[in-house]
Image: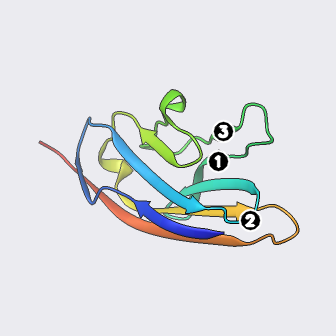
Amino acid sequence: LKLLKVGVPPYILRGEMALLQCQYDLENDRLYSVTWYKDHEEFYRYVPKSHPPQHSYPLEGIKVDHHLSDSQEVLLKNVNLKASGIYRCEVSAEAPSFTSVHGEGRMEVVGM
C-alpha cells in the first residue's frame, strides 16, 4: 500500500464546494477503509465491504456530498468558515498486511 497524493485546497471561498483527494496504490493489498479527519475528528469513512460503503459523521461546518464522493475523493458542499482546518486521509489495508498510510493538508475558508 502506497500513498500517492493527498489533495486539499489551501484556500476556498465560503459557499463553494471543496474537493478532497486521497490517491493511493494498493499494490498487492486489499482495501479495508479510507477515513477522513478534520482536526483529528472523523467525518467520513469508506469501507468497501459495508453496505452502503460510505458513511459520514456530523461535524460542524462539514457537509459531504455522498453522490460525488468515493474511496479516493470527498466533495464537501457549501463550505463555511468552520470548515477551515487540517484534513487528514488515512488508508488501511486488510489482512494479512494491515498496512496503513496517511497524509494531510490545511484548508482555509475565506469569506467574501
- When the figure is inspected, residue 104 is found, relative to residue 23, above or below; the finding is below
Image quadrant occupied by the C terminus: top left
Give the left or right position of residue 41, taking residue 31 as reference: left
Q: Secondary structure at mark 3?
A: strand
Quick check: marks 1 and 3 in contact, CB under 8 Å? Answer: yes
Q: Secondary structure at mark 1?
A: strand
Residue nearest the viewer, comparing 19 with 81: 19
Residue beneath disc 1: 45
Q: Which-is-in-front pick, marks 2 and 1?
A: 2
Q: Which-is-in-front pick, marks 2 and 3?
A: 2
Residue nearest the viewer, comparing 4 with 14: 4
Question: What separation in Å lies between label 2 and label 1 (alpha carbons)?
Answer: 22 Å
**Label placed on residue 73:** none
Residue nearest the viewer, comparing 39 with 71: 71
**Label placed on residue 28:** 2
- When the figure is inspected, residue 72 is found, relative to residue 70, above or below; the finding is below
The residue carrying pointer 3 sits among few (fewer than 14), some (14 to 19) or many (20 or more) residues within 10 Å by Cα, namely some
- When the figure is inspected, residue 19 is found, relative to residue 26, above or below; the finding is above
In the rendered image, residue 90, in percent from the top left (x then y), is placed at 60, 63
Q: Amino acid at mark 2?
A: Asn
Q: Amino acid at mark 3?
A: His
Q: In terms of sequence position, does the residue under pointer 2 or pointer 3 come before the other?
A: 2
Q: Secondary structure at mark 2?
A: loop
Q: Residue at x 42, y 50 (%)?
A: 20
Residue beneath disc 3: 55
Q: In terms of sequence position, does the residue under pointer 1 or pointer 3 come before the other?
A: 1
In the rendered image, residue 110, in percent from the top left (x then y), is placed at 20, 50
Extreme front residue here? Answer: 28
The residue carrying pointer 1 sits among few (fewer than 14), some (14 to 19) or many (20 or more) residues within 10 Å by Cα, namely many
